[in-house]
Amino acid sequence: MELVKNGAIADLMEAGTVVKTAFCGPCFGAGDTPANNAFSIRHTTRNFPNREGSKLQSGQISSVALMDARSIAATAANKGFLTPATALDVEYKGQKYHFDKNIYANRVFDSKGVADPSVEIKFGPNIKDWPAMSALPQNLLVKVVSEIHDPVTTTDELIPSGETSSYRSNPLGLAEFALSRKDPAYVGRAKEVQKAQKAIEDDECPVEALEELKPVMDKIHETYPEVGKGNLGVGSTIFAVKPGDGSAREQAASCQKVLGGWANIANEYATKRYRSNLINWGMLPFMTDTDHESLPFKNGDYIFVPDVRKAVEEKADVIKAYVVGDELKELNLKLGDLTDAEREIILDGCLINYYRNH
C-alpha cells in the first residue's frame, strides 16, 4: 500500500516490472518460469532440482542462478548485461513506511467477539478438517518407512508444490503426494502402519489390525512385558541425512503427521523452520550421531522407544531406543535443545492440542 501511495509502483511498472500479490507461487514456477534449455537468473531462493517445474525425465531442464534483487534491477537497467548493483552509480533512498490498519480492517472478517456458533460454516468440497491427533504415548513403536541418503532433502521433495496446491485445505488429500518425487511407495507404507494406531485409538488390538506387529511385540515383551494397552503408540518415521531445506511450508511435516508419522530421524536438520514444524505437529525431531552409511536400522525396521514421554518431560539428553529384530539392538537418539513450550507441544500431540489444552 505504501508503494502505491508514494508512486513507487507506477515507476516500477513503467520500467517493466511485473507487480504480483504476495503469495506462494514464484518459487514453484507460477509465473516467470525459466525457459527450457536456457540459463536464467532469479532472486527467489528456490534453486533446487526440478524447483521451477522442469522435469528431467520429460526432457526438460531449466538452469537457474540466484542473484540479489538489486543486481537484477541493475542488469535490467543495463539492457540485460549482467551487472552487479555495486557497479551502478545510484543513490539508494530508503522509503519511510507507515502502517495502515485499514487494509486488514476492511479485508479480514472480525466477529468482534459476537460470533454465533449456531451458524454453520460453509466449506467447499476440498476443505476438510484436521483429523484428531493423539498425545504422545508413554512408549512408542515406529516403523522406518522411508530412508533417504541424499546430502540434503528439501521440503519440495517431502511434499511437492505446484500440482498439489489445490489440496492445501485438505490435509489427507495433500498427504497422498508426500515424498512422491523421492519415494513413491512412502504413502502406502505409512498408511499400512497407521492401521495399528487407529486400532489403538478405537480401543482395539493393534496386532490384529497389523499382523506384522506380532513378532515385533513378542520380542519387546521379552524385556518390557508391561508395554501394551494404554501405554503404547504405533506409527512411522523417516530417516533423512539433512531434511528441511528450502520452502518453509509446514505441510512437509503435517503430511507425515496425518499419515501416522510420530518422528523424523536425521543426522542434522537443514533449517530451524522444518524442525519447528515437526515439533508443532507433535513429531519428535530425533537426531543420531551415527553416520548415515552405518545406520543400525534400515527401511522396514521397527524402532522401539520405551518411556519416551518421560524422557521428553525430564529433558533427557540421550533417549535410548531399540531396533527390533532377532534381538533388541540399542540405538541412542537425541532431541537437541527444546523450549518448555516445545516440549509441551510434543507431549500434547501437536500445536492444535496445545492451544486447546492451555
Image: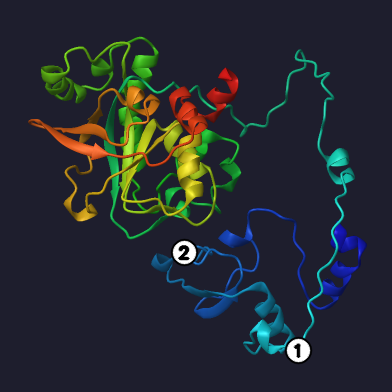
Does residue 7 lie above or below 274 as drawn? below
Marks 2 and 1, how far apart at CA:
37 Å
When asked about the image quadrant of residue 91, the answer is: bottom right
Task: Please tell me whether mark 2 or mark 1 is closer to you in this view.
Answer: 1
Q: Is residue 29 rendered to the left or right of residue 280?
A: right
Does residue 215 lie above or below 28 as drawn? above
Where is residue 185 shown, x and y percent of the image? 32, 44
SS for dot 2: loop
Where is residue 6 shown, x and y percent of the image? 91, 65
Residue at coordinates 42% horizontally, 71% vertically from top-left? Answer: 59
Q: Circle 2 is placed at which residue position?
A: 50
SS for dot 1: loop
- Residue 169 in sight: yes
Residue at coordinates 53% horizontally, 80% vertically from top-left? Answer: 39
Q: Circle 1 is placed at which residue position?
A: 89
When asked about the image quadrant of residue 33, the answer is: bottom right
The three-letter code of the residue at mark 1 reads: Asp
